[in-house]
Image (spheres, rainbow, N blue to C red):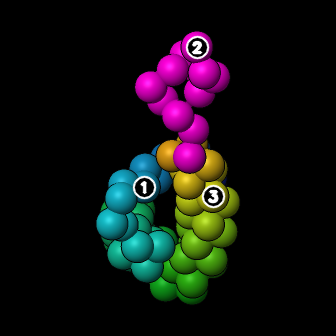
Amino acid sequence: MDVNIGKNGVERIIVYEGDTASSLAEEFCAKHKLKREMKSKLVTLLEAQIAGVLPKIMEDDDVDTSTEEGKPK
């Protein structure tokens, strides 16, 4: 997820399996010396982003990858 941090431009937050929105926001705010109130906004955005990606991952897992593009031969 790309986050606009004002004068310093855009910084990317990469989410890995097992990451939580809260821990990612905490690290990001500390790294960029952002105000504490930004953490709650960032948590909300990260949760929405993670929730939007998870269904896509679940759908991809349902595709039979043993055949080309999930189509039977």
Dot placed on the residue nearer the N-terminal end, 2 or 3: 3
Q: Which residue is mark 3?
A: 55
Q: Is residue 30 above or below residue 39?
A: above
**Mark 1 to mark 3 CA distance (whole Å):** 15 Å
Residue at x 52%, y 34% (from the top left corner):
64
Q: Residue at x 63, y 58 (%)?
A: 55
Would you name the residue on which mark 2 appears? Answer: 73
Instruction: Give amino acid for label 1.
Output: Val
Q: How dense is the environment of label 1, judged by Cα within 10 Å: few (below 14), some, or many (20 and up)?
A: some
Q: Earlier in the sequence, mark 1 or mark 2?
A: 1
Residue 33 in picture, x, y percent from top left: 40, 69
Residue type highlighted by circle 2: Lys
Crowding at dot 2, Cα within 10 Å, few <14 / some 14-19 / many 20+, comes out as few
Q: Secondary structure at mark 3?
A: helix
Query: Residue at horizontal 58%, vertical 14%?
Result: 73
Q: Main secondary structure of the magenta part?
A: loop
Q: In the image, which residues are magenta?
A: 62-73
- Label 1 or label 3, whichever comes before in sequence order: 1
Q: Which image quadrant is residue 6 in?
A: bottom right
Percent coordinates x, y for residue 3 in the rendering: 59, 54
Q: Of tags 2 and 3, which is closer to the observer?
A: 2
Q: Is residue 53 magenta?
A: no
Q: Which residue is mark 1?
A: 15
Q: Position of residue 14 (x, y in %)?
A: 43, 50
Q: Are marks 1 and 3 in contact (CB under 8 Å)?
A: no
The answer to whether one can see residue 3 in this image is: no
In reply to whether residue 67 is colored magenta, the answer given is yes
39 is higher (above) or lower (below) than 50: below
Q: Is label 1 or label 2 in front?
A: 2
Residue 68's tag is none
- Residue drawn where x is 42% and y is 55% of the image: 15
